[in-house]
Amino acid sequence: MEIQPPGGAFTRVEGDTPARVGDRIRTGPDSYAIVTYFDGSTTEIEPSSTIEIVRLDSPPGGGKTISIRQEAGLTWNRVEKLFDANSRFETTTAAGVVFVRGTEYKVRVEPDGTMIVEAVTDTVIVETVVNGQTVQVVLGPGTQTTVRAGQPPSPPVPIAPAQFSLSIAFDGPVAPFLTDDRNRSIGFHPQGNSYVSQIPGATYRAGAGRQILSVPDPTPSYRLIIKGEDDGPFAFTVRLLANGQPTAMRAAGLARSLNAEVTLSGTIRNGQSLQTDLQVSLRPPSITASNMTSLDGSPSGRVRITQPQVGTSAQELVTGGVLVQVCHFTGNAAAPFQLFTLSLANAVNHQGHPQDVPAVNGVCPRLGLTPSAIPAVTPIAAPSAAPTATAPPDAETPDDGDSSSGSIAPTPIPTAIPIPGQPSVVPVPPTPSTGVSAPTQPEIAPATSPPTEETQQPDATGQVVPDAPTAIPPTTESASPIDAPLPPTPDASPAPAATELPTSPDPSGPTPTRPPTIAVPTTVPTAGPTSTPTPLPPATASVSPTSGPPGTTFNVTGSRFAPGEPVQAVITYPNGGNQVALTADPNGNVRTAVQVQLTDSPGAYTVRFTGSTSGQQASASFTVVPAPASPTTVPPTATATAAPTATRTPTPFTIL
């Protein structure tokens, strides 16, 4: 592989090399390259191909633009999601322009300049100019178009299946990572949890509890790594497909089909990584796999992670129905719940726990719970035992390799009451002298996430230079025949019965603008006032601090209520409201905390206390001010890791 700066000559690339706007990169007939941009997007360059870096912008005001010119050959582009309306990732050729906002697509430039574009996982837009007019065609996933210079793009047609391909189907709480003998990878990096896709046309899908990797044009050998996202059984099946269908070829003179399918199964622990080597033969078709062993050191491949993406694999597995997200009540007023993930099998053991509730779109409630607020949980069917290693049957049964037959199908878990993205009132736990705390359950440790790979650091100019990718030399991996499968994990024992929490009276109060979330009572309610109640002085309320940016926790105190009476706290804020039931302590005081999220709106917030028996009322207000401009207040997915200087010096990226 070679690189040529503007006005310079091509020089050979021996290792990781930064490149900048104006640089041209070309590969020889036996070389490959991977370009990793500042936002984590990548361009894989196939042999005998040439590209030029045209534009790399990431202005401080937001948005980003990445543009490359492809002169010849084949590229495979994986683009991170672009949420800003001004962002764009594009490939230009002599025949037209291809641009996307987050997808995987392939571009081939033929010797005569004809461009063939394949949209693999999302929408791709192709433009060309005909007689001074811009003509555009939109490609849906799985379609392609052909563009010749000066002519409109052809109508979209389905992408023809590869003559040969691999299909690997996974069951169980594992995250896969596959690397071929050219050091190109697809899947979730086991040490960074970042998703990578460097093999042209390869795809990852998850659904109905099963994950599937599809890899066209297989190479002779692969290394497959699976990482446990929870304890439990796993199984995966590797199939060799011909034109999208399982191979049914037979060797001459043999009565049974060749071994074009292999299944491995066993058990895995949370955080454990296992690996196996696969050997693939196309003629005659066969697949062999080595014994599974623990991963020692770093995995093979040329992957550079330009920004943290911890938790990506867990999120995909939750979306695909492999894992379940659960919120465990901690009793901490500032963060009352802890989010963790479980496999379907282990989720059964946590049903009915009074301190566990399902998460809603990955978000936990911000208030405590009483038993009446815990939704009933429909029993979840435990997954069937993982299949053992099996030989292919004699019958040539058609199978596309992607069906969900035998997969783990979860039963839907009811949603929790709170609505995410809104501020809420968090009850403050009582002191030992004024109340009885709710019985506690054993803490459930969350699944730990592995550390990410190195995150890029700014250079002297304030720019971030991602690690440089290099040309990928071919490697050869050996493999031994598969061994007997590992024994499955025995079923976990059922969880102990939970002690019922005391309930607080159902106070009346204004109807909130969203479903209320009920708090854990701070004290045991005492008897109501006597028949001759003593008049109380007017109630008061105070808040500390009185102002702060999103993310601040405001402590609110009310005084002069009847000892032991239920007190309703209602919070009103710019875009909604919420309420929580409290109980006055023996001195007539109530305390709560309002945790304002980073996504909540600035403005005036008011908390009003109302005593249900005394009728006492008091309110206090605080102000949420706009957050100061700082990289720490911007979600990582919306901020380019490499921000250019005020003069918009081109941001460098890295070549593998």
Image (cartoon, grey):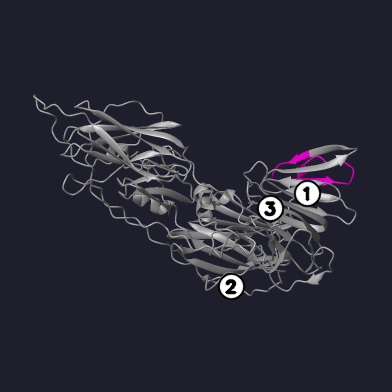
Which element carries disc 3, helix, strand or loop? strand
Q: Which residues are magenta?
A: 137-158
- Nearer the N terminus, badge 3 or badge 2? 3
Which element carries disc 1, helix, strand or loop? strand
- Name the residue beneath numbered marker 1: 117
**Residue sitting nearer the eye, 576 or 439:** 576
Image: 281 above or below 556: below
- Name the residue beneath numbered marker 3: 245
Disc 3 to disc 1, C-alpha distance: 24 Å
Q: Residue at x 54, y 71 (%)?
A: 291
Q: Amino acid at mark 3?
A: Gln
**Numbered label attached to residue 481:** 2
Image: 28 above or below 332: below
Q: Amino acid at mark 1?
A: Val
* 459 relative position to 95: left or right: left
- Nearer the N terminus, badge 3 or badge 1? 1
Q: Are marks 3 and 1 in contact (CB under 8 Å)?
A: no
**Residue sitting nearer the eye, 328 or 204:** 328
Q: Amino acid at mark 2?
A: Pro
Residue 153, can we see it? no
How many other residues sit within 10 Å of disc 2, few (<14), some (14-19) or many (≥20)?
few
